[in-house]
């Protein structure tokens, strides 16, 4: 049923994109700018697709900068600002020119009672307008602080890569707040993958006695951490892991991540 | 005479209006309590402390066992506050309802003292609304939690005319530390980049955190710039595009 809804959303978005006004940028033909050796989509192209012509006339482009994303990826950043320096639009690209982030500022907070399928259709429409790849599979839809998050988690060999993938953030009325595309490097999977039962036994041995573990382990590509739970490096390749969730005696939720081959501890997370 | 002494004592104990405080519960997440070494409370507190300082605030507070009920209440009148701890919709017998709140560290794995909104409100009586309150705990972003109101911040989002000079952030439901770390880092980065609190929050929604593990919420003024008043608009220099 959910897949049917998603396919319907895709169809609606395709129709909407086809009937979009002539000002919409045809994505695959979007010019790619080569400036100071950088290969990227010019912010003006993105702005033309997202902003009204009157808005555009009042904006200026800030100098391009090279930044490191929160996930440690090197990116080029372009920013459109108003005459008084207020940021209106930010575009970040990977050094190979792939678009990674679009963030609009001051998108109105109005609510609109957008349905889940409506939000997916709007998100797909935005991706198509910008010429971005349509992610495979159905997304998850969540709300936070009046915004709607439509998230396609990246999957490799059928296994999710948490925090990677395509995320479109919409206002309650369906206007684009921003979108991001994350793609972390992955390590080669182990030659032999341990059984889930073995992972469960190893996790229980690591956790304090009294920890309730009710769910079966699941595979995921995780960021390895050191013994104190800190990532060894933000761009360290993700490794295939068995993730085991439990609840400590005081009610704290906890997840331990074990190497899918050796069952050595790779990382963990908790919820206060 | 007695009145003058009491007034002097109150002035001496009250943090200046330019001050901020960062509190984090380390013990409840430490290896002796959970079986896994955990530096995340320290990292979360470090991020908040650096951001507050860069925004021009004088930063106090406590991380670890010195984060007690007493130390928190003594800092309750600060203008900017960050707390990372266990949070829940704790029962307030005076209000006869579940009202939110969080636990102190106090060096205890279990049963650390709870700070209730009514106690914070009592300490803040007469103080103006706080500028920035970040309660990095479970449940205190829910409407049932009265914490934002205790800091003088109504549970509404305002953008445009008549915005309050305040911003409150917390989480709805269960908040995982890994996701909180990513979200908060992006939020602070947004502020240091010159974004308003609402825009920094929107930008943080775009970073790589698992939305199943975190549902952030805010109240206050979207365009509020939570820097210390005397600092004016801080010059972030090279940080602006870093």
Image: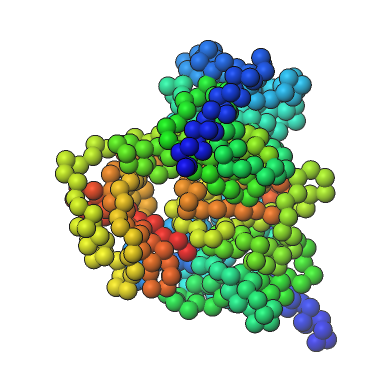
Q: Quadrant of residue A25?
A: top right
Q: Is residue B16 visible?
A: no
* Viewer-side residue, B165 vs A222: A222
- Looking at the image, how many numbered discs can be counted on the residues? 0
Q: Quadrant of residue B61?
A: bottom right
Question: Residue A122 location, x and y as percent?
Answer: 60, 33
Question: Residue, x 61% and y 59% (percent of image)?
Answer: B141
Q: From the viewer's perspective, is residue B30 above or below residue A141?
A: below
Q: From the viewer's perspective, is residue B114 above or below residue A194?
A: below
User: Which color scheme did the rendering employ for the protein?
Assistant: rainbow
Q: Is residue B7 visible?
A: yes
Compared across the picture, whether B32 is left or right of A71 comes to: left
Question: Residue B170 location, x and y as percent?
Answer: 60, 58
Question: Residue B228 location, x and y as percent?
Answer: 70, 52
Question: Residue, x 54% and y 33% (percent of image)?
Answer: A9
Compared across the picture, whether A250 is left or right of B73 comes to: left
Residue that extends furthest to the left in the rendered view of this protein: A192
Question: Residue, x 57% and y 39% (percent of image)?
Answer: A117
Question: Residue A182 location, x and y as percent?
Answer: 44, 35
Compared across the picture, whether A202 is left or right of B201 comes to: left
Question: Residue, x 60% and y 37% (percent of image)?
Answer: A118
* Viewer-side residue, B73 vs B152: B152
């Amino acid at each position: 049923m959910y897949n049917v809804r998603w396919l319907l959303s895709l169809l609606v978005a395709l129709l909407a994109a086809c009937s979009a006004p002539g000002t919409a940028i045809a994505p695959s033909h979007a010019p790619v700018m080569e400036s100071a050796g950088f290969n990227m989509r010019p912010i003006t192209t993105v702005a033309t697709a997202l902003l009204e012509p009157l808005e555009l006339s009042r904006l200026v482009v800030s100098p391009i900068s090279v930044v490191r994303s929160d996930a440690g990826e090197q990116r080029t950043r372009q920013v459109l600002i108003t005459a008084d320096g207020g940021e209106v639009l930010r575009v970040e690209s990977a050094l190979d020119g792939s678009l990674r982030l679009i963030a609009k500022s001051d998108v109105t907070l109005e609510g609109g009672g957008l349905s889940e399928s409506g939000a997916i259709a709007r998100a797909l429409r935005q991706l198509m307008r910008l010429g971005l790849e349509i992610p495979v599979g159905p997304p998850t839809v969540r709300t936070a602080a009046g915004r709607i998050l439509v998230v396609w988690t990246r999957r490799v060999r059928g296994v999710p890569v948490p925090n990677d993938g395509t995320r479109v953030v919409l206002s309650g009325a369906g206007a684009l707040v921003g979108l991001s595309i994350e793609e972390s490097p992955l390590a080669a999977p182990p030659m032999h993958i341990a059984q889930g039962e073995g992972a469960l036994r190893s996790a229980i041995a690591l956790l304090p006695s009294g920890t309730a573990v009710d769910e079966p382990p699941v595979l995921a590509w995780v960021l390895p951490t050191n013994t104190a739970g800190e990532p060894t490096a933000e761009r360290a390749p993700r490794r295939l892991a068995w993730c085991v969730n439990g609840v400590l005696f005081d009610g704290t939720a906890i997840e331990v991540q074990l190497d899918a081959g050796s069952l050595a501890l790779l990382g963990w997370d908790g919820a206060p | 005479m007695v009145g003058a002494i009491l007034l002097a004592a109150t002035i001496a104990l009250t943090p200046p209006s330019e001050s901020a405080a960062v509190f984090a519960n380390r013990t409840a997440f430490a290896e002796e309590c959970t079986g896994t070494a955990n530096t995340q409370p320290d990292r979360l507190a470090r991020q908040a402390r650096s951001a507050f300082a860069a925004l021009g605030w004088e930063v106090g507070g406590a991380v670890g066992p010195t984060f007690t009920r007493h130390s928190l209440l003594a800092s309750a009148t600060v203008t900017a506050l960050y707390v990372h701890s266990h949070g829940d919709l704790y029962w307030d017998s005076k209000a006869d309802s579940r009202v939110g709140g969080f636990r102190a560290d106090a060096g205890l794995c279990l049963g650390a003292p709870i700070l209730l909104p009514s106690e914070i409100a009592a300490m803040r009586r007469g103080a103006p609304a706080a500028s920035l309150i970040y309660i990095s705990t479970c449940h205190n972003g829910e409407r049932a939690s009265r914490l934002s109101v205790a800091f003088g911040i109504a549970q509404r989002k305002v953008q445009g005319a008549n915005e309050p000079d305040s911003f409150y952030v917390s989480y709805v439901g269960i908040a995982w530390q890994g996701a909180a770390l990513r979200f908060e880092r992006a939020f602070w980065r947004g502020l240091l980049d010159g974004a308003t609190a609402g825009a920094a929050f929107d930008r943080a929604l775009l970073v790589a955190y698992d939305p199943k593990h975190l549902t952030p919420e805010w109240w206050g003024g979207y365009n509020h710039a939570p820097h210390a008043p005397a600092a004016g608009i801080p010059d972030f220099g090279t940080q602006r595009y870093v």
